[in-house]
Image (tube, grey):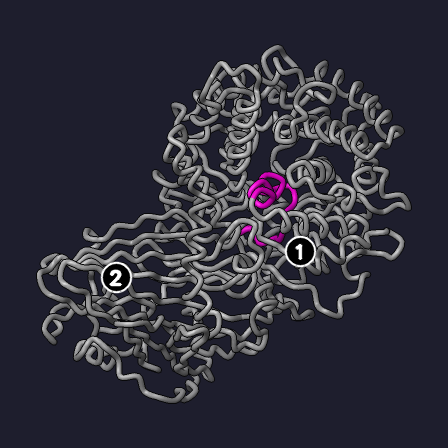
């Protein structure tokens, strides 16, 4: 979480003003001014130009790591993320679908399928009545139903993107398909035409720089022909092309309009379609645009739908930005999909053809994946929606998935030659490098304290990407950056990165990720207490869930890789420095030294102390797996001593205190106090030999959180507030203590389910879903946090992907019930 007391007032859904007289406010202002005005770069967090809430977004198009284009629920293309990590929140009005209906050779109805009434393209028929349209989404698919009063024709547009678990090829493709199902309720045939128009660009000033051009294409392979228009967008950095296309088949005709002015009236296109339901299909490419000009194109596909019959038309949108530079422009990166398609910028026609000939296969795989959840009558409908729709962030989180260069040397990916990380190179060569932003406003890649929560989605659905990400973190652990940096909080100066310490992030899109890490400069995160622990917890969790050779491959760095005296032990040894009194438990340092980076914690703490004990427990388990008896004995002794200290210092009979400082707020009830138990339960280590927390205490703490933080907050309808006093009012000692963090709530719900509090878990999580998706209208932009009074922070955030830990808890619970020798309950989803 990146937060200070800076809250900007923008309507009713913004924050309180920053106390600019404070040092941190002035320090940030000076830094922001230098960054944006002199360096001409985006700040890693822009608190002076926060993205406003727009309740218009829908399911994004595209696979993983090739960029995304979002078509909103009203039909507009309104959010663009083609350059890695850079967003353009522009509704490009020319990007539309238009329907033309003809009977007996005459056009009887022609309408842009948009409720907008723009000042441009006045020659088109705008203002479709939204009352007759219905939008349904279950990521990565959308169904939009259009009715036309008096026409007795219904169109259903099904939008499909290739987001398929455990698929590392098609899931990388930058494409989306629109399948139009046509239903004719008349007693006579109706000719239906669908026109797809698109502007060359993303609605930014680059559209007018000149030199852009369009050209028609026809691509035929294995008996299937696809026709359309490629729009070449020729920028100096990261040029790209867009392609709109349709599939030619028996009874369907594809036509096109190569170039028109989207800022004019558009009559030439409209009248062309109106005349015969087709476009003129001129040959040849368009002339390059002059500076200040904008150009667009259109593709039309049409067929005759018999009386009382049905028809299908198929269109696609593809984009091709294969070779990308980040903001520093130092290194060239090839996107993952270039392994399967050309990297020369000419792949858009082939991508279009592939999408239109493979989407049916994609949908079958999506059905197989989603069906068990959707058909489980024991699961509430809101949960099914949240589980799949929150996955949008894996593609639309500024996500980048790139290949390692063919000439990449081992030192580039395994650190210094003496670290022994040679196992990394083959894995990264096979699966590439994956990174996603902390949030669309918090522009740091693979923010590790937050990815800790979100990682469940990745390891359950694309585990090789999680392992690749972990390997990249391993490389940064053994490296250091001796450059000095002045941090905004406190003004202290320190090294950017210390050796044997897990980084906060692997860089920002406006610089050079992987090469320069730790874009976050609020605190010196070398002193954070949770980063190292979260690495150890994920190492074992990933091994446990994948059951491949990951454990041994993730623990190199010594001559005998069958021992555990490697990276997890290295970072744990680094972490031991924070156990100042040698009681087996680390202490926090009196500042916000963990993911709650505006919530001060001092001494032993429920959150970091719990993560520490869980990590020590997993060190014991890994040592056991690898047969390292010396390490096993060492960490078993620490575990026993630490457990005693944790209980003595923090347990108050009902829950674990926030910290042991004895301050006014040290007895606060933290909703995230069982985070360590959450991970242990996910790995089957929550009881028996490696138990870190007494079961009775865990259940008591969870029940207290449910009573106070959930039901005692907003009438139990908004999830769990981060901090609650024993007296039943939210802890207002910091900005973050009085917030609800959606991702933390989903993790809390998963912990409740693990411990048998299934009903409480679902009730807790439902409050967040209802608040975000229904009350606040934040579809496909789930924020990090909100407060009771409709105040939110950081739209479109990584952490809510933790909802997949709920699914893991449910599956584990069902598995245990199925294998139990005597089952007293037939429904494994209920206690």
Residue beneath the point at 43% across and 83% down: 213
Q: In which quarter of the image is residue 128?
A: bottom left
- Furthest residue to the front? 223
Asked if residue 448 is among those painted magenta in the image, a careful observer would answer yes
Determine which of the numbered discs, if any, sits on residue 114 in the image: 2
Look at the image and tell me in which quarter the N terminus lies.
Answer: top right
On the rendered structure, is 419 left or right of 175?
Answer: right
| Place of residue 591 in the rendered image (x, y in percent of width and height, measured from the top left) | 69, 34
- Residue designated by label 1: 507
Determine which of the numbered discs, if any, sits on residue 58 in the image: none
Between 281 and 795, the one nearer to me in the picture: 281
**Structural distance between the alpha carbons of marks 1 and 2:** 39 Å
Magenta stretch, residue numbers: 441-460
Between 440 and 309, the one nearer to me in the picture: 309
Please identify, in this view, whether the residue under mark 1 or under mark 2 is nearer the observer: 2
* Magenta region, main secondary structure: helix
Between 772 and 101, the one nearer to me in the picture: 101
781 above or below 115? above
727 above or below 342? above
On the rendered structure, is 456 left or right of 419?
Answer: left
Asked if residue 525 is among those painted magenta in the image, a careful observer would answer no
Q: In which quarter of the image is residue 94?
A: bottom left
Dot 2: few (<14), some (14–19), or many (≥20) neighbours within 10 Å?
many
Residue beneath the point at 19% across and 65% down: 305
Whether residue 221 can be seen here: yes
User: In terms of secondary structure, where does tag 2 sit?
Assistant: loop
Q: Which numbered disc flags the more N-terminal residue, 1 or 2?
A: 2
Q: In which quarter of the image is residue 373?
A: top left
On the rendered structure, is 648 left or right of 23?
Answer: right
Between 821 and 798, the one nearer to me in the picture: 821
Dot 1: few (<14), some (14–19), or many (≥20) neighbours within 10 Å?
many
């Amino acid at each position: 979480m990146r937060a200070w007391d800076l809250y900007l007032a923008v309507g009713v859904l913004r924050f309180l003003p920053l106390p600019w007289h404070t040092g941190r406010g002035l320090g940030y202002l000076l830094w922001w001014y230098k960054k944006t005005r002199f360096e001409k770069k985006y700040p890693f967090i822009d608190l002076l130009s926060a993205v406003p809430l727009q309740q218009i977004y829908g399911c994004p198009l595209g696979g993983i790591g090739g960029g995304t284009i979002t078509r909103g629920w009203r039909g507009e293309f309104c959010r663009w993320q083609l350059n890695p990590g850079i967003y353009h929140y522009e509704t490009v009005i020319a990007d539309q679908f238009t329907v033309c209906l003809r009977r007996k050779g005459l056009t009887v109805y022609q309408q842009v399928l948009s409720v907008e009434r723009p000042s441009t393209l006045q020659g088109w028929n705008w203002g479709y009545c939204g009352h007759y349209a219905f939008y349904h989404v279950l990521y990565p698919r959308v169904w939009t139903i259009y009715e036309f009063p008096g026409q007795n024709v219904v169109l259903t547009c099904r939008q499909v993107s290739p987001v398929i678990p455990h698929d590392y090829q098609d899931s990388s493709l930058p494409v989306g398909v629109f399948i139009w199902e046509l239903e004719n309720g008349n007693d006579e045939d109706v000719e239906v035409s669908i026109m797809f128009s698109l502007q060359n660009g993303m609605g930014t000033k680059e559209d007018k720089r000149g030199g852009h051009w369009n050209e028609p294409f026809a691509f035929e392979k294995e008996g299937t022909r696809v026709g359309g228009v490629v729009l070449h967008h020729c920028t100096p950095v990261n040029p790209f092309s867009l392609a709109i296309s349709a599939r030619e088949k028996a009874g369907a005709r594809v036509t096109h309009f190569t170039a028109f002015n989207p800022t004019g009236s558009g009559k030439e296109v409209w009248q062309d379609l109106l005349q015969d339901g087709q476009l003129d299909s001129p040959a040849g490419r368009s002339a390059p645009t002059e500076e200040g000009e904008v150009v667009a194109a259109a593709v039309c596909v049409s067929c005759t739908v018999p009386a009382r019959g049905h028809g299908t038309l198929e269109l696609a949108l593809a984009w091709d930005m294969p070779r990308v530079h980040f903001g520093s422009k130092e290194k060239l990166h090839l996107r993952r999909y270039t392994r399967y398609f050309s990297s020369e910028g000419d792949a858009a026609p082939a991508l279009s053809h592939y999408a239109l000939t493979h989407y049916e296969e994609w949908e079958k795989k999506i059905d197989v994946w989603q069906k068990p959840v959707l058909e489980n009558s024991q699961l509430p409908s809101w949960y099914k929606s949240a589980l799949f729709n929150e996955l949008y962030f894996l593609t639309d989180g500024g996500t980048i998935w790139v290949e390692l260069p063919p000439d990449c040397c081992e030192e580039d990916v395994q650190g210094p030659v003496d670290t022994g990380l040679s196992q990394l190179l083959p894995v990264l060569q096979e699966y590439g490098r994956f990174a996603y932003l902390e949030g669309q406003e918090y522009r740091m890649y693979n923010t590790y304290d937050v990815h800790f929560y979100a990682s469940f989605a990745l390891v359950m659905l694309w585990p090789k990407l999680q392992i690749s990400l972990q390997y990249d973190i391993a490389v940064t652990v053994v490296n250091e950056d001796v450059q000095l940096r002045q941090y905004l909080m406190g003004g202290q100066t320190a090294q950017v990165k210390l050796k044997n310490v897990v980084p906060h992030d692997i860089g920002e899109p406006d610089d050079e990720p992987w090469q320069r890490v730790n874009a976050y400069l609020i605190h010196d995160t070398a002193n954070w207490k949770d980063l190292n622990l979260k690495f150890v917890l994920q190492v074992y969790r990933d091994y446990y869930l994948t059951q491949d050779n990951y454990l041994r491959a993730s623990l190199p760095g010594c001559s005998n890789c069958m021992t555990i005296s490697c990276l997890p032990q290295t970072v744990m040894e680094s972490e031991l420095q924070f156990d100042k009194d040698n009681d087996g438990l680390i202490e926090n340092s009196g500042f916000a030294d963990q993911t709650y980076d505006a919530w001060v914690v001092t001494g032993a703490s429920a959150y970091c102390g719990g993560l520490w004990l869980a990590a020590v427990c997993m060190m014991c388990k890994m040592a056991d797996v690898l047969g390292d008896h010396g390490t096993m004995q060492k960490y078993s002794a620490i575990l026993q001593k630490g457990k005693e200290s944790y209980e003595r210092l923090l347990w108050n009979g009902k829950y674990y205190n926030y910290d042991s400082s004895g301050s006014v707020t040290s007895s606060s009830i933290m909703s995230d106090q069982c985070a360590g138990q959450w991970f242990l339960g996910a790995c089957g280590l929550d009881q028996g030999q490696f138990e870190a927390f007494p079961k009775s205490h865990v259940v008591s703490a969870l029940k207290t959180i449910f009573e106070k933080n959930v039901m005692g907050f907003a009438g139990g309808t908004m999830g769990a507030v981060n901090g609650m006093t024993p007296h039943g009012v939210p802890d207002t000692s910091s900005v973050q203590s009085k917030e609800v963090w959606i991702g933390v709530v989903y993790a809390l719900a998963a912990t409740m389910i693990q411990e048998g509090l299934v009903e409480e878990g679902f009730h807790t999580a439902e409050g967040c879903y209802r608040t975000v998706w229904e009350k606040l209208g934040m579809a496909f932009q789930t924020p990090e946090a909100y407060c009771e009074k409709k105040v939110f922070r950081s739209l479109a955030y990584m952490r809510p992907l933790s909802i997949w830990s709920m699914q893991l808890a449910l599956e584990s619970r069902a598995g245990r019930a199925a294998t139990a020798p005597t089952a007293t309950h037939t429904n494994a989803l209920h206690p």
